[in-house]
């Protein structure tokens, strides 16, 4: 998850921006986003968008990262019934979609539950 | 500054919203405009097509020329506007400004959309086009799920129950049940809405506007084109304003506030020299229940978190203080995405000219129309008034 | 085999997917118990594959090693490559932000992972590269109803290997390898599931290669079972590694820490490397560890490892194998067929 950071006012962005939303500076440097976050909102999407039928139903969440940046991502490995506003999550690397059985495979970030007490404490930093 | 030229809506046309399997995009557009064009002595100075999804739904681009040709408007400058669900609102805004700029005296705005013969997964994909391709669409999130994320936050923040949110579809369907051009002429109870099938939890199928085929058009003319007699039956565009916002709602500092809607509404009311209290009815972009609530709150019609309570109390009913979605809105009349904003204009026209039958808002003098692209990524607000603000036909 | 310059493990990362299929679920549908006795197996979700699991394990290993982008090679050892033609290793390299790097996929049935460790060892030992990453990962395939379906599991581990220093977490003191042409298990080009000759998988394949490799290791490095605190063997089922260990003179106490098959199944290339990760999670400095893989077709790599002082602190950066095992959700056979693309839509 490569975002960026304003060199002038230190504001952090994901998705990366061309112009700092806070101070209008164009002096921004790439910055890897922290992998830990918490759930601000979530949903179980019953009908799939074309190309995602295999994963139906999909869970999506609005995640606030530990640096305060918010993003929308698929939530995996999280039993839907136990998902709550405030649940701790961490970024994972997953297959997003494929161009059919013979086309290219696309990978990207999703979010899942911490797998170890060690990771849970990391998400609380 | 001298007073700018006034722009009027002299005529409208539209088809029923729903299934038009037997017609192409151009044919639906023709059905909506054939009477209007036949009765006009001369063709408009320009035509603007509002459409969001023709490339995906009909494998058709170059829509301006395609539709102009189908309407036998050879020689007329033709343009196409795409702004997702706000395409219609955007086209009206541009058409009015073309006339105000003095370049044109009459502009036909034609909203047309056709999606009903698409596979549902393709419809989801098409509707999702309004969101950021790399950071939303890429991951397979539907526009319904994006709205669901917003709805859950809204409900959580203001302690709004699922049942309370159902107030808006109930109002919309009450109005659409008597609207002849509506896709769903059926009333629903609060319980039916709350218990309908989950589309993207917590949103239910009855929270989500149904995609429909349809075309609607409005002929915009400058005041100089109208005789004093014609003016009596025309509706004046008192103001049309637009504003844009951060596309990803989750990047906004205040996620439960629609800044584009607020700014466009404030500017439009100011230009029209009206306060919200003087507005007799509103046509809202109510494609998902929480959009209606947040739009109302952002325009100051309800306190934050109170819109659902106000709706339940009848404030937004046809006979309430601020009737909304008087023919059912996107929710009840149906949601032909790019054409929706033009349907709203047609409906406001009917209210102001007292042609609304069962759906008539008594003594409607001023109407406010709000439409948006995506989730308030752009908002278009028009304030319309009956010509002269006095006597009626 | 010894490198001219001493080498060591600098970081390791394990990955076991979240879902478990109890073997009783496979038996419910197909009856029988196969090689049986494993309780459940780890199943990758529908959006997981060798690439994603390699990236998860690699990120931990690289962070623990503290080498970031200074890797000279990334090799992925697997028999479940995501593309028939297109390297998995370049996708892992991209995810780690590495570009000036040797990248290749290795295939040697279940020993592709230790094969990658051998080659990284050689590159580091010769001075060609400073640090290299070996990923041992599989989403093992088992034909529905086949004995393999009871055990074929997903998961694996990644190891960063560099020159031995006072920051190293575990020294690699030496290794041997032993191969022969044995037709115990194979998958032809274009086929979805492997085939095996049951009669050949035991004595002439697993036991012959494992025992020969370990005995050769004992001879070459003048060592014996009692010199080791831990021993990890390839685990196609719960029985084979125990049997081989016993025949070679190891006790249950030495092998139980690294014996994961009963609770996660056979992760093929990931099997013995994951067992090693479980051992590194608890080993004390100077503990000696034997690692022996087995790959059909056939061959075994055997290593002598020695835990070092920095392991105690550095392993806190990883996710313990025990936690990955215990953090799970059980699924039924229906969900399993959905996850592993055994359903036709």
Image: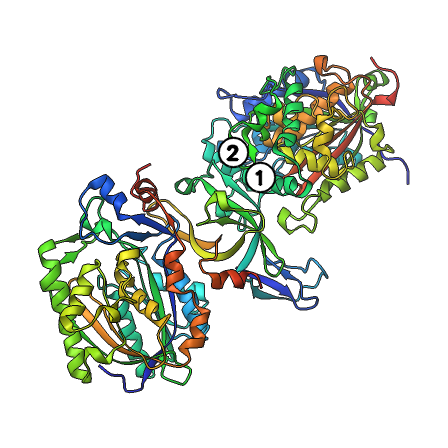
Q: Nearer the viewer, residue C49 or A64?
A: A64
Q: Nearer the viewer, residue C4 or B374?
A: C4
Chain ID of residue with mark 2:
B
The image quadrant that residue C207 belongs to is bottom left
Q: Which mark is residue B148?
A: 1
Residue A77 pos. (x, y %)? 44, 50
**Is residue C188 visible to the viewer in this orientation of the structure?**
yes
Secondary structure under the numbered disc 1 in the rendered image = helix
> Are dots 1 and 2 in contact, CB under 8 Å?
yes
Q: Nearer the viewer, residue C120 or B132?
A: C120
Q: Nearer the viewer, residue B125 or B197?
A: B197
Q: Earlier in the sequence, mark 1 or mark 2?
A: 1
Q: Is residue C143 above or below residue C247?
A: above
Q: Is residue C303 left or right of residue B233?
A: left
The image quadrant that residue C332 belongs to is top left
The C terminus of chain B lies in which quarter of the figure? top right
User: Which residue is rendered at x = 49% and y = 21% of the image?
Assistant: B21
Q: Is residue B30 above or below residue B95?
A: above
Residue B125 pos. (x, y %)? 50, 39
Q: Which mark is residue B199?
A: 2
The figure's colour scheme reads rainbow
């Amino acid at each position: 998850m490569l975002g960026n950071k304003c060199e002038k006012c230190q504001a952090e962005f994901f998705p990366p921006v061309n112009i700092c939303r806070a101070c209008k500076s164009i002096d921004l440097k790439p910055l890897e986003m922290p992998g830990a976050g918490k759930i601000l909102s979530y949903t179980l999407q019953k009908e799939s968008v074309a190309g995602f039928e295999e994963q139906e139903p999909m869970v999506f969440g609005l995640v606030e990262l530990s640096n305060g940046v918010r993003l929308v991502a698929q939530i995996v490995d999280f039993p839907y019934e136990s998902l709550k506003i405030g649940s701790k999550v961490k970024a994972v690397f997953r297959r997003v979609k494929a161009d059919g059985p013979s086309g290219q495979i696309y990978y990207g970030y999703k979010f899942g539950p911490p797998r170890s007490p060690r990771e849970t404490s990391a998400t609380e930093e | 500054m001298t007073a700018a030229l006034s722009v009027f809506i002299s005529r409208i046309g539209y088809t029923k919203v729903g299934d038009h399997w037997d017609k192409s995009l151009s044919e639906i557009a023709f059905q909506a405009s054939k009477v209007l064009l036949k009765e006009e002595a001369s063709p408009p100075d320009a035509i603007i097509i509002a459409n969001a999804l023709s490339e995906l739904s009909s494998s058709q681009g170059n829509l301006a020329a395609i539709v102009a040709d189908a309407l036998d408007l050879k020689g007329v400058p033709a343009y196409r506007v795409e702004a997702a669900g706000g395409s219609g609102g955007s086209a009206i805004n541009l058409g009015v400004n073309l006339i105000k700029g003095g370049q044109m005296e009459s502009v036909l705005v034609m909203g047309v959309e056709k999606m009903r013969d698409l596979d549902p997964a393709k419809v989801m994909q098409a509707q999702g086009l309004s969101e950021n391709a790399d950071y939303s669409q890429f991951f397979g999130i539907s526009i319904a799920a994006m709205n669901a994320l917003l709805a859950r936050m809204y409900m959580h923040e203001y302690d709004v129950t699922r049942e309370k949110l159902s107030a808006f579809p109930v109002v919309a369907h009450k109005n659409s049940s008597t609207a002849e051009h509506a896709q769903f002429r059926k009333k629903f109870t609060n319980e039916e809405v709350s218990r309908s099938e989950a589309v993207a939890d917590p949103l239910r199928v009855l929270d989500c506007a149904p995609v429909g085929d349809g075309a609607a058009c409005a002929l915009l003319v400058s005041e100089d084109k109208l005789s004093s007699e014609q003016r009596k039956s025309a509706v004046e565009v008192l103001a049309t304003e637009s504003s844009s916002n951060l596309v990803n709602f989750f990047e906004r500092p205040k996620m439960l506030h629609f800044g584009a809607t607020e700014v466009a509404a404030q500017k439009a009311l100011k230009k029209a020299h009206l306060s919200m209290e003087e507005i007799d009815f509103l046509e809202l972009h109510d494609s998902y229940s929480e959009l209606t609530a947040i739009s109302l709150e952002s325009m100051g019609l309800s306190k934050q978190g109170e819109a659902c309570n106000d709706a339940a109390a009848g404030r937004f009913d046809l006979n309430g203080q601020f009737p909304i979605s008087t023919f059912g809105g996107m929710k009840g009349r149906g949601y032909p995405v790019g054409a929706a904003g033009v349907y709203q204009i047609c409906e406001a026209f009917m209210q102001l000219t007292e042609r609304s039958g069962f759906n008539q808002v008594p003594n409607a003098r001023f109407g406010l129309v709000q439409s948006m692209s995506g989730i308030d990524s752009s908002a278009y607000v028009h304030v319309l008034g009956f010509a002269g603000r006095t006597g009626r036909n | 085999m010894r490198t001219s310059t001493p080498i060591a493990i600098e970081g390791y990362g394990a990955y076991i997917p979240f879902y478990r299929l109890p073997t009783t679920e496979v038996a419910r549908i197909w009856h029988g118990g196969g090689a049986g006795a494993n309780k459940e197996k780890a199943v990758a979700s529908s959006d997981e594959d060798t690439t994603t699991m390699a990236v998860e394990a690699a990120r931990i290993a690289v962070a623990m090693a503290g080498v970031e982008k200074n890797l000279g090679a990334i090799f992925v050892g697997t028999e479940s490559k995501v593309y028939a033609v297109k390297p998995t290793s370049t996708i892992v390299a991209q995810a780690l932000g590495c570009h000036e790097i040797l990248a290749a996929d290795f295939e040697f049935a279940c020993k592709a992972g230790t094969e990658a460790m051998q080659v990284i060892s050689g590159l580091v030992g010769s001075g060609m590269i400073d640090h290299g990453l070996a990923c041992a990962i599989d989403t093992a395939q088992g034909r529905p109803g086949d004995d393999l379906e009871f055990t074929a599991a997903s998961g694996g581990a990644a190891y960063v290997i560099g020159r031995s220093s006072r920051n190293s977490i575990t020294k690699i003191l030496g290794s041997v390898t032993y191969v022969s042409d044995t037709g115990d298990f194979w998958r032809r080009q274009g086929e979805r599931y492997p085939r095996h000759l049951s009669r050949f998988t035991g004595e002439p394949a697993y036991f012959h290669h494992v025992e020969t490799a370990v005995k050769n290791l004992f001879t070459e490095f003048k060592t014996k079972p009692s010199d080791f605190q831990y021993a990890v063997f390839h685990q196609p089922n719960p029985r084979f590694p125990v049997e081989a260990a016993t025949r070679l003179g190891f006790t249950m106490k030495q092998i139980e820490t690294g014996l994961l098959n009963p609770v996660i199944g056979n992760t093929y290339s990931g099997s013995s490397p994951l067992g090693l990760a479980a051992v590194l999670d608890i080993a004390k400095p100077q503990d000696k560890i034997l690692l022996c893989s087995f790959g059909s077709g056939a061959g075994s790599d055997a290593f002598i490892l020695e835990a070092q002082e920095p392991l105690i602190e550095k392993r806190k950066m990883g996710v313990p194998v025990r936690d990955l095992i215990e953090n799970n959700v059980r699924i039924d056979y229906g969900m399993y067929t959905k996850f592993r693309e055994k359903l036709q839509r």
